[in-house]
Amino acid sequence: MPPLSPVERIPTPLGGTGVSASVIEHMTELLDKLRRSELSPYVIGGSLSNLTQNVAQRMQVDDFKNDSDGPFAVSRWGFYTTDALAASISTAVFSNVSARFIDNDRKRILHKTEALLPTIVSIADNAFVLDRPHVMAPDGSFTVMLREQDVADTTDVYLALRGTAVVGGLLSAAEVRELSAAGLYPKTLGRDVAWAQGLLATFLLGEGTPALTPAGEMLRLALRGRVAELRLKLAQAHYGAYSFEGSLANIAQNTSSNLPNDAFRNDSGFPVAITRLRAGTYTAVAAAAAGAVFSNVSFKITHAGPNRTLTRTRVLAPCLFTISDNEWVFDHPLVLGPDESLDIGLVEENVNATTDVFVAAHGEQVAGLSATELREAISLGLYQPWKRATW
């Protein structure tokens, strides 16, 4: 390869060489689409009962289909294994179950060979966190192959894919992948990882970037103005910790029961950015140490207002909440506008016990922006909830 000329060696806004104005203009268009989209928590999942020893079995493909109205950026999957659901704390995955993932939409195998679950997931929380979101197109799906290795048992496997639906109908799955590869897809909450947003200022808003077409330059100027406006509003906003809590005693077996809707309605008058849900399950609260969520409780959660499902179907608690701290941390904050709420349905699966369920949604009020503006700031990666540094 011949050496670069002096002009070709001049650093570009992407930190590489020779990036054309057309690339920057294309990314400007994608970022403008992203700011007008909403990043909504989303989960899909399913189960397979009584695995057959040493036989590869496929989970139902329809259970792992993206039914949101936009691309689904999967950031982690959570497993749970059991020989019987019970009103007792959830534990680490079995050591005799192996899994293999295939992206049906793109015909890609994510695991070269089958792998035992303890080598895939952390046994502290039964979750596998991807280095970069795996983006599924609308109606895209996964094939998940399972095998019970060597030991014959009545093993049941539950799985949930967790992440973010990029809703609004403006971006394709391929475009979300481009934004992620360019570093313009906002980073996930509290983690600075491979897809962290960090090039916005230099790539699109900095001085000395290549001239674009007239239409592209007008779009970039409008985006610069909008980012400046949102940054000023965020700087002048008032923030205050806020949470919603609700509970339901002795939930019904195999029948959906709803937590009190009013408990999760935002009547504060301001947008609330929810960063996480926490759950507690008990046969009776007691003056004793709390444990992991029970394995026999399922959740079905909807964002009422836009009427958008956070869980496509009901999801078993240990697949939704990490068993180490009973938390579901959203990749990006969920904004509840004034008078919007969460509808949380509960089911006691198979076991008739006196199970009580407590749920809390945690985040902060943001006074100074509308719900729409706060969602836009989240999509642009401008709003990042404060996280204490490690001392």
Image (cartoon, rainbow, N blue to C red):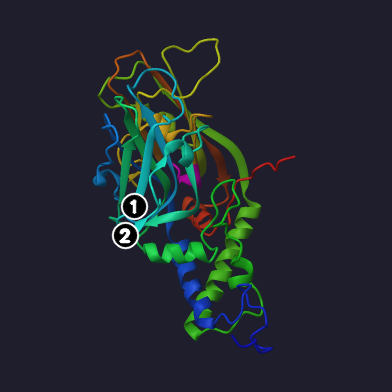
Amino acid type assigned to the residue bearing label 1 in the image: Ile
Q: Which residue is mark 1?
A: 102
* Depicted 320 relative to depicted 386: above or below: above
Q: Is residue 310 visible?
A: no
Is 8 or 287 nearer to us in this picture?
Answer: 8
Place residue 349 in its image quadrant.
top left
Total numbered circles: 2
Furthest-top residue in this view: 287
* Depicted 48 relative to depicted 192: above or below: above
Pointers 1 and 2 in contact (CB under 8 A)?
A: yes
Q: In the rendered structure, does residue 96 fall within the stretch colored magenta?
A: no
Question: Range of the magenta residues?
Answer: 330-339
Q: In the rendered structure, does residue 335 fall within the stretch colored magenta?
A: yes
Q: Where is residue 334 drawn, in percent x and y? A: 47, 45
Q: Which mark is residue 107?
A: 2
Residue placed at 45% from the left, 43% from the top? 338
